[in-house]
Image (cartoon, grey):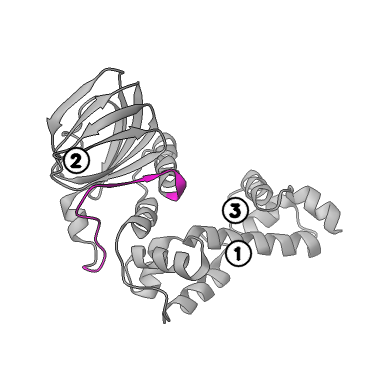
Amino acid sequence: MSDLTYEFRGQMLRSVQANGLAVIDQHTESGTTLPRHHHSDGWFTFLLAGSYVERLASSQRSCSAGMVIWHPPGLVHENNFVSKGHNVNLVLGQKWMENLPADVALPHNDCSWQDGLPYRLGLDLYRGLNQDAQVPAEIVFELLSLCASAPNTHGQIRWFPRVLDWMNDEYSCTLTLSQASELAGVHPVHVSRSFRCKLGCSFHEHLTLIRIRRATDLLKRAPYSITEIAHACGFSDHAHLTRTFKRATGLTPTVYRNQAG
């Protein structure tokens, strides 16, 4: 497997790569200049801290914490760091990008986003790097559903009800975007894009909503412990249910049960 990290300069604290993707945790000291260069592969930069000026062939931009930047392959650039920087880079290998559907394409030109969901997905990549040192393809598919072109998904989607029924039936199991794409017979990016267009949320957000609704029902009617309800609804343990339930409702499962009873 080719190394997707060798073209990155500055201090790389750690990196992980698999299946044509790589995530790099990179720090850069204040006053550092990365001279003009380019990369063979396309990549996203999630700027977690610090700021720098990026000079391109005919323009320049100021980059600060909270930005997400897409760099297409071959983009010539120079970075001058104004302050100590910390960023996470997501590299998409050429072969990986070639396996994307023909109707899913990342921009040919560089572009950027400020904060919002693309940045939150970058934070998820960083947390995943801290936890289990893997490249979470599910997060990459979610990111591409926001940043890549795709067919219009506002019309009828024949496979969508089938995926919703599957989620309603199997919510207690570990369900993934990749499994949903196999059931639908389309690429995971299309599944993710369709959920956002049809329901206004991601696949995983909708799955969490189903689980919270089921937990709410059991808390009202069933004499099970919180741990038993957590496992029955697809949460890993008591703490996972409590954390997710409180974020969604403002109450812990115990308080909700007491008030509902």
State the image quarter where residue 88 is shown: top left
The one nearer the camera, 191 or 178, is 191
State the image quarter where residue 234 is shown: bottom right
**The residue under label 1 is which amino acid type?**
Ile
Local SS, label 2: loop
Horizontal side of 105 relative to 138 (left or right) equals left
Residue 60 position within the rendered picture, expressed as x and y whole percent measured from the top left: 23, 36
**The residue under label 3 is which amino acid type?**
Phe
Is label 2 or label 3 in front? Answer: 2
Residue at horizontal 56 percent and vertical 72 percent from the top: 169
Residue at horizontal 31 percent and vertical 33 percent from the top: 62
Instruction: Give the label on residue 235, or none.
Output: 3
Which label's residue is closer to the chain start, 2 or 1?
A: 2
> Taking 132 as reference, is 233 above or below it?
below
> Taking 19 as reference, is 214 above or below it?
below
Highlighted magenta segment, given as a residue range: 102-117
Disc tally is: 3
Q: CA distance from mark 2 to mark 3?
A: 35 Å
Residue at horizontal 50 percent and vertical 58 percent from the top: 204
Which quadrant does the C terminus fall into? bottom right
> Mark 2 = which residue?
4
Horizontal side of 178 relative to 3 (left or right) equals right
> Taking 65 as reference, is 121 above or below it?
below
Give the crowd class for mark 1: few <14, some 14-19, many >=20 residues within 10 Å. some
The one nearer the camera, 115 or 258, is 115
The one nearer the camera, 71 or 126, is 71
Q: Is residue 226 magenta?
A: no
Residue 140 position within the rendered picture, expressed as x and y whole percent measured from the top left: 35, 52
Which label's residue is closer to the chain start, 2 or 3?
A: 2
> Mark 1 = which residue?
210
